[in-house]
Image (cartoon, rainbow, N blue to C red):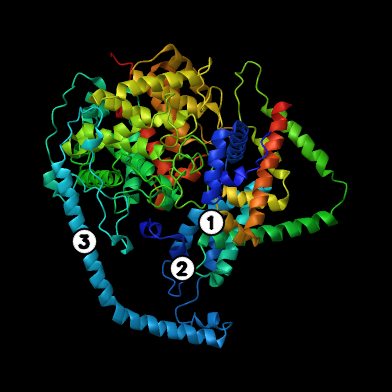
Amino acid sequence: MSPLCSDRSDQELFLAYKSPTGTGAVAAFEELLNRYQQKVLNFFYRLTFNKEVAEDLTQDTFTRLVQSAREYQPRAAFKTFLFSLARNAWSDYRRCEENRRKSVSLETKVGDDADAELKDFIKSDGPAPQEIVVQRENIGLLKKYLDNLSPEQRITLELCVFQELSYEEAGMILEIPLGTVKTRVSAAIMQIKKKMEIQINK
Amino acid sequence: MKCDKNYDLVSYLNNEVTTGERAEIEAHLLDCPDCRQEFAALKATIGRLKSIPPITPSPALKTRIMEQVSRFQPQPVHTLWFIPRFSYVPAWAVSVAVHLIIFAGLSIIFIRPVQKQQEKTISIRLAQRVEEEKKLLDSSPGLPLVAGEIKPEEREPAVQRPAGEDDIPTPLPDRIKRPIPEGIIVTRPVDGWKVKLKPVPDRDDKLLAHFNGRSNIKTRRELLQKYQAGDTEPAVKGGLNWLAQAQSPDGAWDGSRYGGRKEYQVALSSLSLLCFLADGHNHISGGAAAESRPERRDTYTALVNRGIKFLLAQQDSDGLVGPKTLNGKPARPNAEGGQAGSPALIGGDPVTYSGMRDKPVNYMYNHGLATLCLLEDYIMSRDPALERPVNQAVSFIISAQNANGGWGYTKGSPTAGDSSVTAWQIPSLKLAQTLGIGGAAESLEKAKNWLNSLTNADGFVGYSAPEQYPNGPYGLSAAGMSGQLFMDQSSSALSELQAHLLTKRLPHLQDEHPETESDFYYTYWGTLSMFLQGGKDWETWNKNTKQTLLKSQVRNGSYAGSWVPDDKWGYFGGRIYATSMAILSLQVYYRYPALTDGR
């Protein structure tokens, strides 16, 4: 039970964690973990749609947080700092994946597999004949739409729409100008909207 | 889209446009049906994306991370921790820093007394202002509870700020303009709270009379036995315990401390208070707690007192409880009533807008829930000090109703309104009508017609049009069903049909039924409506849902007693929302009267 921890802001908790006296440091960190674990996990989950990978990357991010605690400037918002680390973890992961894919056989037909998967999704979600037909979200399709975005659009959308960061914060995390954030988010949403409309009209 | 204006509606939706652009876009949206359609489509797109259910971390993840943390213990005390930081800083910077520190030290010594003096002046001025306002309040005629419409001249006159006072930092938020009515003063000694309840004038009314039962332990035991729900008591007790420790000293529940959103502080505080009210506590006396939880009686009375006091302090001169903008400053021109603002907390539209501070708040969730709190507390305490705030809050709900009978996020919102916001206004209006507050009955009638127009032949209730379900049809249908049952206080062929629909989608644990999503919104409205409806379907629902809730309560650690906000609205309401909605669902057996038992 640590009601004292709960009263503190993210920043206070993190400063308490890195404070030299070290009392309550672990508790403070735990509180931060409680606050952000799910957000970070779902950040990676929506980028990968793979829970296992998302958990590994979440662990990686918090490890980075511990290692780079010293670099944290109290001027920056804790959330921005944390997501910068998450973004770094994501970039490193993608680089590794890229290398791995290059070295692995070139026979895997990514496109075909994805299509088959899509068909499976549609099939499995079809309503039983006697069931009342109601508009129900097809989660598989939504994931597909996200998968079709460029990695840059996708991470920007993730930060601005799913994580509800401001465009300015997202720009700081991704180290890109505000205008670029704007363009990416708008383009991503427009693209998905178009796909949804095509799907409905099918 | 035929319109060639090409506005960046996505940025508008995300609240990332300048004030000028916003005004321009909003004006254009009113004129251009094409862009309105485009806007709705974009909003729906974001809404659908956000309906991807978040995953919950496996328990092992936390263990893994914490293990690593313990390996990376922060530096021991005796190391000179600050030295490495300066190692890459140029010498001039160190010099500047040292000078700044010296200067700061000197300023503490020399500037402090001046500041103190200033603070003192401010507090004196504030005290004077409160005095003045008190006089104004005393001189205005007291409103009888059955007052009907409040005439504008009966309202408190706006208090003019003395010239030049604007430059002084005000320690109180701008909107706390009203002195707290007598009787809601938290410093009153505990003995002074034991005020006798006034007799309930309309004792014949089953709905009002039922509130007496909340504070009667025998009634509760009978009801729990009747519904075979005795096992819910420890869970409710644990939940209340957790909520109690989460209350801030000012009486509010700050959602942002527990993963919720700041702008819904009033709604989250109200949801929490509703749990304590359902447990039989009001701001004056302990009620059921006197017998069931004697150790908690005074604590919870004081807690409700603080909470109600907080809500009253949030009420403005129009009766609205809660801020219109996030920082409490008046809404900017064109901002109020705009569709883009903040997201709906519960149900409604999941689109979120980031970076909002002086942006408008979608306040009707806040207000609807706060009004329900004030009404329930009034009915239970009969404290005359609540008469005026209650009247004004109800009047605000009535005045915010759209012509079609629904409510939107804000008063005069350009959209049609939605069934989710509407559902939260109905219980308040029903209680107001029962108390005889003028205008409530007509308002309910209009709401009823509108809800009917949203309902399709299968019994599903749409969001702002029939068969429109941005987040699936079940949550909205449960909310709509509750609304109808609550205002009619009787079941119908429609509610029978709906009860049957809801049993097709029983709330399950996601671990056990991976195909279901955890959804406290649906659980709350479903449980309330099924309880009101009664019958076989309710038995099925109750058996299942009670177990689901009991199993998902956090048992250990600092969150023991709470519920994990892992549902689709968890990002908005956080743990306070999840916990209060779960507790209210478990209190359903004694919170309101069932419609079936011999009416």
Which quadrant holds residue B428? top left
Kindly report which numbered mark, 3 or 2, lies closer to the viewer in this rendering.
3
What residue do we see at 50% from left, 39% from top?
B339
Instruction: Identify the residue under disc 3.
Output: B125
The picture places residue B567, in percent across and down from the top left corner, at 51, 40
Residue B557 visible in this rendered orientation of the protein: no
The picture places residue B560, in percent across and down from the top left corner, at 39, 48
The Cα–Cα distance between marks 1 and 3, rounded to whole angstroms, is 54 Å
Which quadrant holds residue A19? bottom left
What residue do we see at 19% from left, 37% from top?
B291
Q: Chain of mark 3?
A: B
Q: Chain of mark 2?
A: A
Taking depth in this image into account, of B508 and B45 the one nearest to the observer is: B45
In the image, residue B459 above or below residue B59: above
Tag 2: amino acid = Leu
Q: Which mark is residue A15?
A: 2
In the image, residue B355 above or below residue B279: below
Instruction: Identify the residue under disc 1.
Output: B63
The picture places residue A50, in percent across and down from the top left corner, at 67, 46
Taking depth in this image into account, of B508 and A149 the one nearest to the observer is: A149
Tag 3: amino acid = Arg
The reply, left or right, for residue B201 in relation to residue B544 is: left
User: Which corner quadrant holds the C terminus of chain B?
Assistant: top left
Residue A78 visible in this rendered orientation of the protein: yes
Q: Which mark is residue B468?
A: none
Query: Quick one: SS at disc 2?
Result: helix
The reply, left or right, for residue B529 in relation to residue A156 is: left
User: Which corner quadrant holds the N terminus of chain B?
Assistant: top right
